[in-house]
Image (cartoon, grey):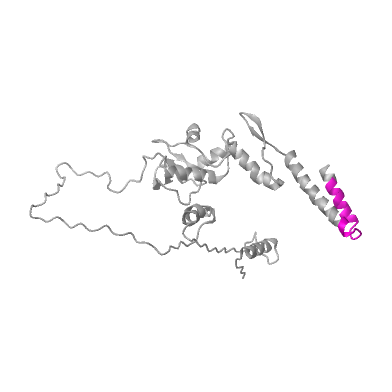
Amino acid sequence: SKLTDYLACNKIITEYKGRLEKDQNDDIANRKKEFDKKVNEALIRAFNEVIKYSAKEGLKTYELKDYSYNFSTQINTNLLNEIIEEEWIIKSVGRKLLENINMLPTTGYNVKIKDLYEAFLRYDDKPMITGQEAIKDTVNRFCSNRTFNVGVGTATKFTNIYSGQNVPFLDVNSDEYWLLDPSVVMELPGKDEKPEPGTEQKPNPPSPSTPKPKQEPEPVAKTYNKIIISGNVPIENYSQLFSSFINTLKNNRLKIEVKFTASSTDSNPLMENSQLIKSVKESASQLGLKFEEN
């Protein structure tokens, strides 16, 4: 019925264009706008149930409680917020869940981060996750508070081990990142070497006439006027730029310069009048960026 009213107004405007008085035109236009709003509201209330399926529990239904002003916001914002609140989708994984799915590392048992990520993609006995960021957030949070350490390398040899910090450029699809028990740390050269019995060197007691060494003042840490980080970053690691630099330095009057260089390929040529080039030019114009071609 709401659509019928809307379409009726639209038909009058189309068929009687130029033949209506100004006040009639304004009245029809206002009615059309009002009916358009009511159609949107009716759509939101008509499609307000979410259904999730799992092999173990079958179909589960959830009815949305909040209603937005338009259908797009209802799906992209309200829907997502409510199913996150219901824990149908989670933004990060808790310690208890890691234990329940046997993905919490212990002494002698390391967990590949890629296996942890794929466990949530392949099996419906676990909550859905918002994406790779959910696993990255989990790993960085628990590595920072030393619930576990993160090693880089193979299952038998690690080239680096992170503890008490975020893991830079973490790639959850890589086979090289591992969750480790917090007792697993990098072994420093000569750490385990012990002197032979009888060869321990004992410090000589100070002579009564020897003056005490003068204590030097602690060096004052240098303060930098500014720092600049630059270079080429593989496209698969771009998601790490926000957590590693933008979010970290946001309170230090951070300025960001960007430069994108794209080249034609046999399968994707950069044609002058192509939709791709038009779209990129328009985006550059809206953002105030310079567009160059050669």
- Residue drawn 36% across and 44% down? 185
Query: Looking at the image, is 271 positioned above or below residue 117?
Result: below
Query: Looking at the image, is 289 positioned above or below residue 173?
Result: below
Residue 153 showing in the rendered view:
no
Q: Could you say where residue 191 lies in the image, as x and y percent from the top left? A: 28, 46
Q: Could you say where residue 251 lies in the image, as x and y percent from the top left? A: 47, 57
- Residue drawn 47% across and 43% down? 139
Residue 59 showing in the rendered view:
yes
Left or right: residue 131 versus residue 146 is: right
Quarter of the image for the C terminus: give it.
Answer: bottom right
**Most distant residue in the front direction:** 23
The magenta stretch is 5-24
Q: Could you say where residue 254 lies in the image, as x and y percent from the top left? A: 49, 60
Q: Quadrant of residue 67?
A: top right
Quarter of the image for the N terminus: give it.
Answer: top right
Query: How many labels, in total?
Result: 0
Q: Quadrant of residue 258?
A: bottom right
- Residue drawn 68% across and 65% down? 271
Is residue 292 rendered magenta in the image? Answer: no
Is residue 20 rendered magenta in the image? Answer: yes
Taking depth in this image into account, of 201 and 205 the one nearest to the observer is 205
